[in-house]
Image (cartoon, rainbow, N blue to C red):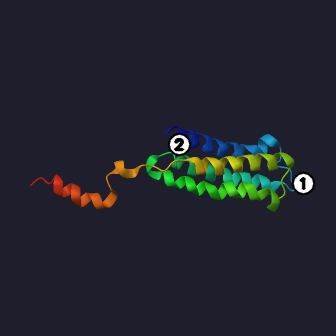
Amino acid sequence: MWRNVVVSVVVPAIGVELMAAPSLLGFAFDRATDFGGAADSFRTVGPIIVAAGFLSAFRITRALRWFNLVPGLWLLAAPWLLPHPGDAVVNGLVAGVAVVLLTASGRRADLSRYGGGWKAIPRRSQEGAVE
């Protein structure tokens, strides 16, 4: 259980850090060196990681954590596809590795507590029918 709690807190925090990184590292508005692609990449991937990380915190939507593999792998590939300054390369690679590893380390949710979904409705109505 603690592993899922850590993943549910750390992965969205990585997304928030990615959104702030262009301004914090100073490559947000550096159009002279054309690092706008890196800033746009971080600002696009960050909210996706935050949203999927937050939604996967709930037991019933835990499978959404696998959606974070795509942005995590993008962060690993982006330095070779877009121009990145040195600090952004390190930041993107560390964040990408962390997102991929944390996504893969989460446990599968036990959904047996949730009553069986739609197929359980007729069974419950027959068991507790008031006539």
Label placed on residue 112: none
Q: Are marks 2 and 1 in contact (CB under 8 Å)?
A: no
Please give the name of the residue rendered at 81% of the width and 55% of the height, measured from the top-left corner: 36
User: CA separation, marks 2 and 1?
Assistant: 40 Å
Residue matched to label 1: 33
Please give the name of the residue rendered at 64% of the width and 59% of the height, measured from the top-left corner: 70
Q: Check the image and name the residue furthest to the right.
A: 32
Res 51 visible: no
Percent x, y of residue 4: 53, 42
Task: Judge the density around disc 1: few (<14), some (14-19), many (≥20) Cα neighbours within 10 Å.
Answer: few
> Residue 26: which quarter of the image?
top right
Residue matched to label 2: 4
Percent x, y of residue 130: 12, 52
Q: Check the image and name the residue furthest to the left.
A: 131
> Horizontally, is 25 left or right of 57 in the view?
right
Please give the name of the residue rendered at 82% of the width and 60% of the height, measured from the top-left corner: 80
42 is higher (above) or lower (below) than 10: below
Percent x, y of residue 62: 49, 51
Res 36 visible: yes
118 is higher (above) or lower (below) than 2: below
Of helix, strand and loop, which one carries label 2? helix
> Horizontally, is 91 left or right of 4 in the view?
right
Name which residue type carries label 1: Thr
Name which residue type carries label 2: Asn
> Horizontally, is 118 left or right of 18 in the view?
left
Of helix, strand and loop, which one carries label 1? loop
Q: Check the image and name the residue furthest to the top.
A: 2
